[in-house]
Image (cartoon, rainbow, N blue to C red):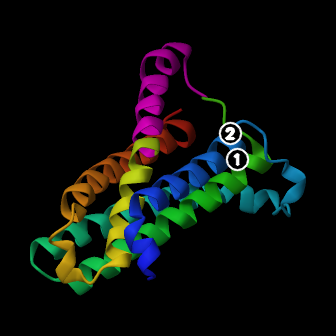
Amino acid sequence: MSQWARENVPFLTGLLSAVALALVFGAVGGAIPSGVLPRASDAVLAALPHLNAAISAGAIVTILLGWRAIARGNVGRHRALMLSSFGLFVAFLASYLYRLILVGTVEFPGPETVYTYVYLPFLAIHVLFAIVCIPFVFYALLLAATRPYQELYHTRHAQVGSVAAVLWLVSFAMGIGVYLMLYHAF
C-alpha cells in the first residue's frame, strides 16, 4: 500500500469507521430510501435473518481460528482467517442493511417484561459492542495492510487486534442471541 496510507492509518481508520457507521445509522434512521435498491422476493427477504445468523456463526469460528493461528505463530493462516472474518462481516452488514432498508426493523414477538428487561438491554449491549469494534477492526486491518508482518511487532496491531477480536466475538455472539429471541424463542 502507499506510503501515504501507511503514515495515515489513524486518519483512514476514522474515515472508514465514519463511513461504515453513517451507512448503518442512515439505514436504521430511514435516510436511505428503499427505492434505490432492487427488491428481492419475499422468500429471500425472509431468509436473510437466518443467513445472517449463519454468517455470524462462521465469523465467530474464523475469528477464533485466526486468534489460535497467531498464538501458534502461523502468520499466513492468521492473515487469511482474519481477512475471511472481515469478508464475513462485510457480507453480514450488506445483507443486514439491505433487509433493514427494504423491510425495516423486526418487532419483538415476546412478552413485554422480557422485551423491557431482557431483550432491550441485550440489544443495547450488542449494538454498543458492534459500534465500538468498528474502529478497532479497521485500525488492526489497516496496520496489517500497510506493513510487512515483521514490522507489525513494532506497532499496536497485536493489542488493538486483541481488543477488536474480543469485541467482534461478543458482538457476533450477541447478534445470534438477538436473532434467537426474535425468530425462535417466542
Label 1 sits on residue: 100
**Residue closest to the eye, 41 or 15:** 15
Q: Main secondary structure of the magenta part?
A: helix
Q: What amino acid type should be assigned to the residue bearing mark 2?
A: Val
Q: Is residue 101 above or below residue 5?
A: above
Q: How many marks?
A: 2
Q: Residue furthest right?
A: 35
Q: Secondary structure at mark 1?
A: helix
The residue under the point 37% across, 77% down is: 146
Q: Is residue 89 left or right of residue 33?
A: left
The span shown in magenta is: 109-130
- Residue 117 location (% of width, % of height): 43, 16
**Residue closest to the eye, 168 or 109:** 168
Q: What amino acid type should be assigned to the residue bearing mark 1?
A: Leu
Q: Residue furthest top?
A: 113
- Residue 11 location (% of width, % of height): 46, 57
Q: Is residue 179 left or right of residue 6?
A: right
Which quarter shows the N terminus?
bottom left
The residue under the point 32% across, 48% down is: 167
Q: Magenta includes 123?
A: yes
Q: Is residue 56 left or right of residue 61?
A: right
Label 2 sits on residue: 28
The residue under the point 16% across, 74% down is: 70
Residue 57 visible? The answer is no
Judged by depth in the image, the label closer to the viewer, 2 or 1, is 2
The answer to whether the residue labelled 2 contacts the one labelled 1, judged by CB atoms less than 8 Å apart, is yes
Q: Is residue 45 above or below residue 145?
A: above
Residue 183: which quarter of the image?
top right
Which comes before the other along the chain, label 2 or label 1? Answer: 2
